[in-house]
Image (tube, grey):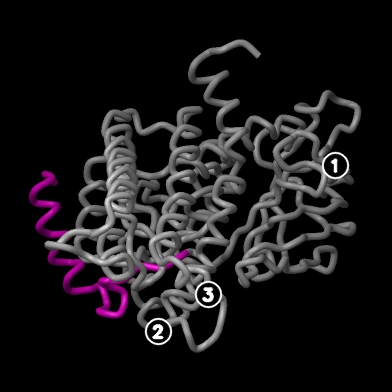
Amino acid sequence: MGLEEFRQETRQWLQANCPDSMRDRSLHFEDADEAYDTDDARAWLATMAERGWTAPRWPTEYGGGGLDRDHDQVLAQEMAALKALPPAIGMGLSMIGPTLLDFGTEDQKQRHLPKIVRGEVRWCQGYSEPGAGSDLAGLQTKAVLDGDHFIINGQKIWTSGADISDWIFVLVRTDPDAPKHEGISFVLVDMHQPGISTRPIKLISGSSPFCETFFDDAVARREDLVGELNKGWTVAKRLLQYERSPGDGGPRTRKKGKPAPNACAELAKRYVGERNGRVADATARDHIIRHTINEKAFQLTVRRAAEEHTSGGAPGAASSIFKYVGSTLSKEASQLKSTLRGTRGLGWEGPGFDEDELESTRAWLRDRATTIYGGTNEVQLNIISKRVLGLPD
């Protein structure tokens, strides 16, 4: 089908099938559980999954939509025009699903991918440990192969959503005598077993999306090893590239009612004041203009990179550029909004602050972490220098 015909058909279909409550809104990922726990959200997911549009570019044999890049981009644009929430989000779609398409066995793809498309399972990530964060290859969680099963012992940290997840993809050390980056395997583990326990980590922002996860003789099946035994570092790096890839301009998640970075001028007019229809303070105007230009440039660069990437292959080391710039801009946006609010951007509780102002303080605290999780900015700069610029170690 031609692009224009597909656009018209998609626009009409979305208008007819997207519930009103899932339109003209956005949210932060930490609020996603509440937003998706409604009858309308479940119906939206079921309707989109029937067409494979929860994973538009995945092959149809695994429940995907089978779209090429151009048709997928049209779908994303039409959803953005409605400000429609994506039918599902999470690590199944953004991280482990694409990785299984690259490295998984046919059995693994058939068992896991259709359930991800239909939103039947939640996935979480078991990478970081208390002594292995930025130096991930220093991980010590061990897995011993015993017949047809791995016996896993150790601890992971910052496992987002582990307390509500069904499966976890875990990096484990399967050869303790091998060099640090070798002897690591990538294993899929069912969370519903007595050998796994979780404990939420309370954050300064007041939310608790992260957990500690403990493995005490937990069991994983041999057929849930992804890739080769002791070669999991290769799989792990590919998954991180998917995690750090910014997409190609489709719908974003941001908390409903909160101003986007390019709406900071309206925020400033409220708190700083306006004169002749523009922000009164010259310094505030300069900060807003600089941030808005950087944000727009980043969005256009992401889109251009997606359009130039016609092969449809996996993202490469350049994804670290987008992770570095994107996380920095997110952090700067929260700081700018807080600064524009002045003392009204410092409230934690009490009758003197409205809901938006209290959320702004929590967002400012929460977004301190954007340059840390998913690989710190320092790690991204190392990757960029070595694998993009080709600089020596």
Image quadrant in which you'd find residue 9? bottom left
Q: Position of residue 371 (x, y in %)?
A: 56, 45
- Number of dots carrying numbers: 3
Q: Mark 3 sits on what residue?
A: 347
Span highlighted in magenta in the image: 1-28
Q: Is residue 274 left or right of residue 334?
A: left
Residue visible at 46% across and 28% down in the picture? 318
Q: Mark 2 sits on what residue?
A: 39
- Which mark is first along the chain, 2 or 3? 2
Tell me, yes or no, whether the two marked residues, 3 and 1, touch with CB atoms within 8 Å. no
Q: Is residue 187 left or right of residue 155?
A: left
Tell me, yes or no, whether the two marked residues, 3 and 2, touch with CB atoms within 8 Å. no
Dot 1: few (<14), some (14–19), or many (≥20) neighbours within 10 Å?
many
| Kind of element beneath mark 1 | loop
- Which mark is first along the chain, 1 or 3? 1
| Kind of element beneath mark 3 | loop
The correct choice, above or below, for 228 with respect to 6 in the image is above
| Kind of element beneath mark 2 | helix
> Toward the viewer: 335 or 320?
335
- Say what amino acid the circle numbered 3 marks: Gly
Asked if residue 10 lies in the magenta stretch, the reply is yes
Asked if residue 80 lies in the magenta stretch, the reply is no
Dot 3: few (<14), some (14–19), or many (≥20) neighbours within 10 Å?
some
The residues tagged by marks 3 and 2 sit, at their Cα atoms, a distance apart of 34 Å
The residues tagged by marks 3 and 1 sit, at their Cα atoms, a distance apart of 41 Å
- Say what amino acid the circle numbered 1 marks: Gln
- Say what amino acid the circle numbered 2 marks: Asp
